[in-house]
Amino acid sequence: MSDTLAQAVVQWQRVHGRNHLPWQAGRDPYRVWLSEIMLQQTQVATVLGYFDRFVQRLPTVQDLAAADEDTVMGLWSGLGYYSRARNLHRCAQELVQRFGGTFPRDAATLATLPGIGRSTAAAITSVCFGERVSILDANVKRVLSRVLAWEQDLAQAKAVRDLWTAADTLLPATAADMPAYTQGMMDLGASLCSVRQPQCLLCPVQMHCQARAQGRATDFPIQTRKLQRSAQQWWVLWAQQGEGGATHEKSAVWLHKRPSRGVWAGLHCLPMWGDEASALACLPAAQRQQVQALPVVKHVLTHRDLYLHPLQVVLPAGQAPQCEGAWVAASDWPALGLPAPVRKLLEQG
């Protein structure tokens, strides 16, 4: 089955797959790598604009390595999962230091770099260099588990390892077909082989799919572990500087840089506390009565829901919140790395 299935995927991808994405031209490993990292947990439609802005500002891995952290986080701001951006920056620096800015041509070496796991490494080297290695992102897991009617629970590490071994047996025989095969498997998972309503009649591998033959396509993949969600309440101090301050702009805001670990690590942010009293305590007593409580903002993260309670206040010239941070002018904060809900608040102000 392996060769005929691979050829079916390759032929379908070359005609019906996604062939005009901005990172596909020239198979530049820098652009493919950047797209792979951006596409983790994020839809293509969202990534397109961020990708274009990123490569316009930092067109090569050397440019990315030389950039400061605030520039990188500013370009990433709003895309979420910010550890990806920090690892991207670190990885670029190691690529320059260890390999002179040239991407290794084998996935095993590439996977030793920060933020590049086995599947991402394989995606880069198979697409750019034709290496015969299999990928196993969420979409491809779904395709393969249906093709093979994979009965093992993919919540278990051993089941994933076994599926990877099986995936290796399905690869095309020639390196020339690897780019189309790898992209085709991703394209199938993102389109026809969807989670709830797979379009089996249109699928190029329907004749090889054991789940379809059994009438059980939506039974796969089997994955029993569920995310345990939690909720947190944060009070957000949105302090603005009144006329006559150092920046001479009413819209200057008080921002601080979050710690290097935890939610929104390393981003510039409005100060936040777990209760309202703590947020108000950092204001001059005379200004606490001037605080305006804005509607609660719900922000959804992978494992938790954040409920943000914005407290807006304008402080007179010469005054500042008694907490970590600094005034940042309206002309400066848009370029900083800001959490998406904070950026949205400031843009509305």
Image (cartoon, helix red, strand yellow):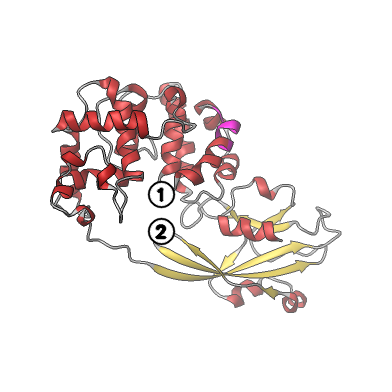
Q: Quadrant of the N terminus?
A: top left
Report the magenta residues as a range: 53-59
Tag 1 residue: 41
* In the depicted structure, whether residue 135 falls above or below residue 99: below
Percent coordinates x, y for residue 304 in the rendering: 42, 64
Q: Amino acid at mark 2?
A: Thr
Q: Disc 1 versus disc 2: distance between alpha carbons?
A: 9 Å
Which mark lies nearer to you, 1 or 2? Answer: 1
| Residues packed near mark 2 inside 10 Å, few (<14), some (14 to 19) or many (20 plus) | few
The numbered mark, 1 or 2, whose residue comes first in the sequence reads 1
Who is closer to the viewer here, 271 or 22? 22
Rendering coords of residue 102 (x, y %):
42, 22
Looking at the image, residue 208 lies above or below residue 287: above
Residue 302: assigned label: 2
Q: Residue at x 36, y 44 (%)?
A: 190
Mark 1 touches mark 2? (CB < 8 Å): yes
Q: Residue at x 56, y 51 (%)?
A: 267
Q: Residue furthest front?
A: 201
* Quarter of the rendering containing residue 125: top left
